[in-house]
Amino acid sequence: MATSRRTPAAAALVACGLLASACSGTDSSTDSGTGQILNVATTAEVTTWNPVKSFSTEVYYLSNVYEPLLWMNPPGSKERFRPALAERWSSSADAKTWTFHLREGVTFHDGEPMNAAAVKASLEASAKDGAAAFIWSALDTIETPDEHTVVLKLKSAAPVDMIASSMYGAWIVSPKALARGEDYFAKGVDAGTGPYRVSEYQAKKRVVLKAYDKYWGGWKGGRYRTVVARITAEPTAQQQMLQSGQVDYAASLPLENVAGFKKDKRYTVTECPTFQSHTAFFNTTKGPLKNVKVRRALAQAIPYDDIVKVGTEGFGARARGAVPAGAFPHDEQLPQTPYDLEAARRLLTEAGYEGGKGLKLTLSYAAENAQQAKYAPLIKDSFAKVGVSVELQPILFNQQWEKAKADPARAQDIFLLMYWPTYSDAGSDNLVSLFRSSDKPSFNLSYWKDATYDKLVDEAGTHTATDQDKAAALYGQAQRRLLEQAPGAFLYDMRSPVVMNSEVKGFACNPNYSFSIPFHQLRRGAS
């Protein structure tokens, strides 16, 4: 992943140039008799090692070091959730009281016991100071009736099973580490219960994870006890590292080259669905874009199929609204905006802009996002066919985002964004975060304010935990409102090709954690 709402600008690194450790030959295929080494190339930089403050690409590592109460299974699984640190859980009929029964005998990496007091401290810290604190907005109090039971009392009904399985804001952390504060985590110190510990960290270069011997899940079956991750932003460099045998897995290859790996028996290619989606926001506070007919015209002048073909090399599918396929409350019945230049011209004429006269727009995208760089010119060229002039502005994502939040009146006209939900309720995240009214913009980069829409998503959220069908119906109405008012255009949902050395076994896709690889599940060969 090149950029998104959480991804910092990536430093460009060249394999065997700046990453001397990647080419030194010091890493072998075994770990001094203690198990196999898994070598990976990834774009995942670390903005913080504090699991409470984490809200970026360091989740790639943290998800192997820390654990939540529950894990969410892939869409279509027989069971929606599976136990993590909680063995059993239940909720009251009104979904305002949730009870979790914890595993016994689990220890944190610093030797502290994982118990009810630790869970209470972790969740309270996430709810108060966490980067994803908003997911715990319904939390009122936490009770610990005994050492291995935690009871969450809510101010309003909420799907805590979904929240507690989030890949942000739900990690359980040693209370001893929490008490030491931010500086304790700064250099890669960890205090989780997961299968790996952070053994080495070189900023922007390298992360080494090593097995936690007392991991409750055990280490049978020849699992990788050491993971060496080289942080390599350039896809071509990752490909070179994979083909030369320096790494077993490359997280971000040039998409146009993946087909070649499919034909090579030395590699396995798995196409994974993700909850990552691309959206084009229209600045509804500026000039012609205040007019809904202009916005609808632009939405119909976007060449969606060409964008999927060129931008994703076919590893994407046209979006059906703001909720990615597989996530709640995705609606397969939601119509897709057609690519219809004649309809676009007609709407522009009705809005007083016949032939696109006077329409000169700016479109910003993340300079480091290779997909956006490929498809942004397609939008420009297609808009020109209806007389609309577009100036493309590639800007590093963090700079682009800060500029967009500062002053809508001086911001871009169109903003391309890749986004994924914090947890698997894209109603309370995508539909709220991206389009609900707010006084200060964060991710609502269309700056749209619509009381009808707000009422629908607010009411839907109150039913998610108790009546998901009712919640989905309301969210469906909200999504149709989005299509009608067109504060943005929904481009595509991304599929991620995972390319590994064919000797690596045990990998399975899970779009709920599409930026994380559970290394503990992997093994080499038939072992």
Image (spheres, grey):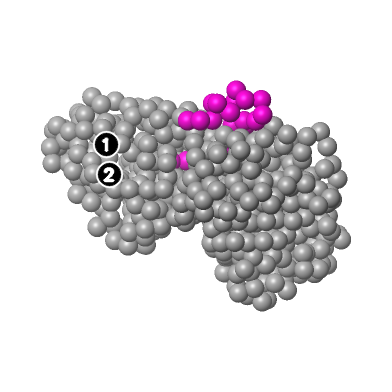
- At x 77%, y 64%, the residue is 109
* Quadrant housing the C terminus: top right
Where is mark 2, residue-wise? 392
Other residues around mark 1 within 10 Å, as few (<14) / some (14–19) / many (≥20): many
Element class at badge 2: strand
Point out the residue furthest to the front here. 24
Residue 197 visible in the picture: yes
In the image, 253: left or right of 362? Answer: right
Give the x, y percent position of residue 312: 45, 33
Tell me, yes or no, whether the highlighted magenta stretch contains residue 275.
yes
In front of the other: 146 or 233 = 233
Say how many tags the image has.
2
In the rendered image, the vertical position of residue 48 relative to residue 316, given as above or below: below
Amino acid at dot 2? Leu
In the image, 168: left or right of 289? Answer: right
Estimate the spatial distance between the alpha carbons at disc 1 and disc 2, rounded to whole Å: 8 Å
Amino acid at dot 1? Lys
- At x 51%, y 51%, the residue is 17
Would you say the residues marked 1 and 2 are in contact, meaning their CB atoms lie under 8 Å apart?
yes
Q: Quadrant of residue 295?
A: top left
Q: Please state the extent of the stretch shown in magenta in the rendering.
A: 256-278
Where is mark 1, residue-wise? 380
Tell me, yes or no, whether the highlighted magenta stretch contains residue 366.
no
